[in-house]
Image (cartoon, rainbow, N blue to C red):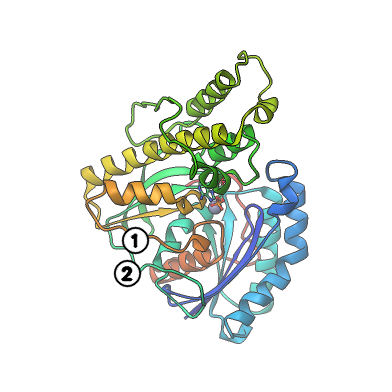
């Protein structure tokens, strides 16, 4: 069975064809990230306009790379939320129209759940992908960490889950992005921070770790403020000194030390929760998902902290992509979820797991 997935929830326009829930045939992604870099964050109007321009070419590319035509596609699957309203709308309306005109069953999926399902891809005909050898087993503990979400979720079975914990404030990716901005490092902040951190001392700056009532919840806003205060102190400036002027006062080594110290504490916060949940629930598999799952320090610390073997998927399948949307669609079919009415499916920007 071949599924076409379509994803437009943020600034990536993506389409992908997968086969039987485990094989990746194509993964077309067009990002408008360069257009947003000048603003230090995603501008919703620019993202939406960009989706409109590239959605059809991206879908064509996904079909072409997979060496399939519309006739070969059994089902289409699209992200219906959460995400930016304008961005979601373009992907969803394009997919609805195609599902109607090509006469294909349609599935609308949750973007955050879909991130987890990227880990089910174990085979590919594409060059340059490093995929896990085995599909995850249940019970499955999933750490979902992206620019918009930080959640720890326990799946008893496919599509049956309990949210064990989540962030009380910022998503961890958002904290990476904000600290990068403070240090004058390029957007998106996650890759910039981890690159800068390579030359830094992770113990150079003392930063607090938040303690919450639920040990599976996270908090990153206090850490972000602590980084700001530490930076003001390093620069010899008062707490009311504008944060936007600090980056110019830091040298490369100071930036590296702050980046490394922030990254260590942010990652330790996540790993502490995953370790506690793994001890309590004894999952058969643990996976990480979402943009921050690309972080090498997270991968290293988790592998060290967990008794179970942990397999990581390719970084190209951690950040936003449509393969994960297609895989989730596949498992909805396998688990007897009905397809939706292609004339009626609507976006849900605030959709939760
Ligand atoms: O999943 P994603 O592509 O989009 C959302 O659904 O949010 O995640 C994007 C987030 C951004 O905040 C970005 O800074 C972060 O993932 N990110 C990273 C890394 N690569 C991307 N964070 C830490 N380390 C990385 N290597
Ligand atoms: Zn995402």
Q: Would the CB of label 2 be found within 8 Å of ligand 1?
A: no
Q: Residues within 10 Å of mark 1 (few under 14, many from 20)?
A: some
Could you tell whether 189 is left or right of 298 in the image?
A: right
Residue 170 visible in this rendered orientation of the protein: no
**Closer to the N terminus: mark 2 or mark 1?**
2
Whole-percent x and y of residue 27? 57, 70
- The answer as to whether callout 1 falls within 8 Å of ligand 1 is no
Q: Is residue 294 above or below residue 124?
A: above
- Give the distance between the C-alpha atoms of the residues marked 2 and 1, in whole angstroms: 8 Å
Using the rendered view, name the quadrant where residue 267 is placed: top left
Looking at the image, residue 160 sits to the left or right of residue 91; the answer is left
283 and 332: which is toward the camera: 283
Residues at marks 2 and 1 touching, judged by CB atoms closer than 8 Å: yes
Q: Mark 2 falls on what kind of element?
A: loop
Q: Which mark is residue 311?
A: 1
The quadrant where residue 135 appears: bottom left
Query: Which residue is painted at 50% across and 34% down in the image?
Result: 257
Q: Secondary structure at mark 1?
A: loop
Could you tell me which residue is drawn at 66 percent across and 26 percent down? 249
Q: Is residue 42 above or below residue 18?
A: above
Residue at 72 percent across and 72 percent down: it is 57
Residue closest to the eye, 236 or 263: 236
Whether residue 333 is visible to the viewer of this picture, yes or no, is yes
Eye-nearest disc, 2 or 1:
1
Give the residue number, with chain letter if any, for mark 2.
Answer: 134
Give residue 69's mark: none
Q: Residues within 10 Å of mark 2 (few under 14, many from 20)?
A: few
In front here: 171 or 98?
171
Which of 146 and 18 lies nearest the eye of the viewer? 146
Q: How many numbered marks have been drawn onto this rendered protein structure?
A: 2
Query: Looking at the picture, how far across and down is residue 327, in whole percent?
Result: 47, 68
């Amino acid at each position: 069975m071949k599924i076409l997935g379509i994803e437009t929830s943020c600034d990536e326009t993506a389409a992908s064809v997968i086969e039987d829930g485990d094989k990746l045939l194509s993964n077309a992604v067009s990002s408008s990230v360069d257009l947003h870099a000048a603003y230090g964050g995603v501008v919703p109007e620019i993202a939406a306009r960009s989706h409109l321009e590239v959605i059809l070419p991206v879908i064509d590319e996904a079909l072409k790379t997979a060496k399939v035509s519309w006739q070969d596609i059994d089902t289409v699957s699209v992200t219906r939320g959460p995400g930016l309203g304008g961005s979601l709308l373009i992907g969803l309306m394009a997919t609805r129209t195609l599902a109607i005109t090509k006469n294909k069953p349609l599935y609308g999926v949750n973007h955050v759940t879909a991130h987890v399902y990227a880990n089910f891809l174990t085979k590919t005909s594409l060059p340059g992908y490093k995929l896990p050898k085995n599909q995850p087993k249940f019970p499955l503990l999933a750490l979902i960490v992206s620019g918009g979400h930080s959640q720890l979720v326990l799946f008893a079975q496919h599509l049956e889950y309990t949210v064990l914990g989540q962030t009380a404030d910022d998503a961890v990716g958002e904290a990476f992005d904000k600290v990068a901005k403070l240090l004058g490092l390029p957007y998106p902040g996650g890759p910039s921070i981890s690159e800068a951190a390579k030359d830094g001392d992770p113990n150079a700056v003392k930063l607090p770790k938040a303690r919450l009532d639920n040990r599976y919840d996270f908090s990153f806003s206090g850490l972000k403020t602590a980084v700001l205060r530490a930076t003001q102190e390093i620069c010899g400036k008062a707490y009311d000194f504008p944060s936007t002027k600090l980056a110019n006062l830091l040298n490369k080594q100071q930036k590296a030390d702050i980046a490394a110290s922030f990254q260590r504490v942010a990652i330790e916060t996540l790993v502490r929760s995953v370790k506690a949940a793994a001890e309590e629930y004894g999952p058969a598999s643990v996976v990480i998902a979402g943009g921050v799952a690309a972080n090498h320090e997270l991968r290293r610390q988790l592998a060290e902290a967990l008794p179970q073997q942990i397999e990581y998927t390719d970084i190209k399948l951690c950040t936003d992509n449509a393969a994960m949307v297609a895989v989730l669609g596949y498992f909805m079919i396998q688990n007897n979820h009905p397809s939706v009415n292609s004339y009626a499916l609507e976006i849900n920007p605030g959709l939760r797991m």
